[in-house]
Amino acid sequence: MGNDALKVAGLNHWFGTGEARKQAIYDFDLTIARGSLTILMGPSGSGKTTVLTLVGCLRDVQEGSVQLLGHELHGASRPMNESLRKRLGFIFQAHNLHESLTAEQNVMMGLQVHGLRGPTYTQAARRALELVGLGDRMTYLPQNLSGGQKQRVAVARALVGNPDIIFADEPTAALDKESGVNVVRMLKELGRARGTTTVMVTHDNRILDMADRILTMEDGRLIKDSGSLV
């Protein structure tokens, strides 16, 4: 697969069955380089999140080819999908933090879902929080954190396993401009430092100038590709 983190060819997807069956994604082609920050834009209902779930092993590929980190997802076994998901990080608009757990404990869950526990992983959680600027908030409960800080905890949780690819769905929508820019800047710096690839769905025009590439979807189709901006 070389320098490609993701390669999609002829991707089609439908929802429903019988007469209610409706096509949502049409003949979608895409190649994304490792270490890049790619933004996927388009109006609500254009298929952005559907594409993200298909290439992120969260939904089965019905037709076409999706090669993720060199592995074909179309027809992939459940163990293969589970193995690949361990190499991915996910950030969503809703931070989905457990209110009864501290910031550190929430980040630890990013490792525990893979069965990883112990002192080494506690240290990894602390390093991830320091990376996002929350080294002094490790013992805080979510109720004592600002909206931007909560989202940074969610980013730390996605990063703690050192993923190859981060899939982010509207991660800055609930943030003020400064917090949103800081989150995206952090993801871009990880691309440079670690080779982490980020694919982000967003409507946030405030962060577009940080993208290496901007894709635009409409009615399930890719209608515009800025190409590489780096």
Image (cartoon, rainbow, N blue to C red):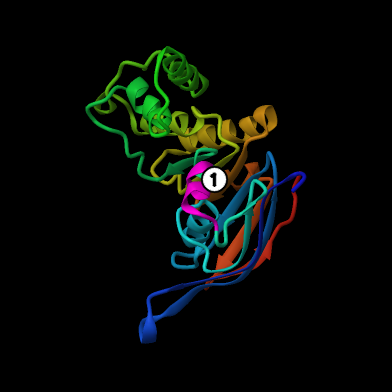
Instruction: Decide whether residue 78 is among the magenta residues.
Output: yes
Residue that sits furthest to the left in the current view: 100
Numbered circles on residues, count: 1
Given residues 23 and 168, the one toward you in this image is 23
Residue 191 percent location from the top left of the image: 65, 34
- For image coordinates 50% across by 38% down, the residue present is 86
> Which quadrant of the structure image shows residue 195?
top right
Nearest to the observer: residue 172 or residue 24: 24
Q: Amino acid at mark 1?
A: Arg
Residue 52 higher or lower than 207, as above or below: below
The secondary element bearing badge 1 is classed as: helix
- Say above or below: 7 vs 153: below
Task: Indicate the position of residue 208 as horizontal and vertical percent values.
Answer: 60, 48
Is residue 7 left or right of 206 when viewed as pictured? right
Q: Is residue 107 left or right of residue 194?
A: left
- Name the one closer to the observer, 93 or 203: 93
Magenta span: predominant SS is helix
Q: Is residue 97 left or right of residue 75?
A: left
* Residue 151 x, y percent position in the rendering: 40, 34
Query: Outermost residue, bottom direction?
Result: 19
- Return the x and y of residue 9 as percentages of the image width and height: 67, 65
Residue beneath the point at 34% across and 27% down: 106
Q: Is residue 102 above or below residue 63?
A: above
Residue at 59% across, 51% down: 39
Pick the quarter of the image with the C terminus: top right
What residue is pinned by disc 1?
206
Span colored in magenta: 76-83
Horizontal relation, residue 99 to residue 217: left or right: left
Residue 77 magenta-highlighted: yes
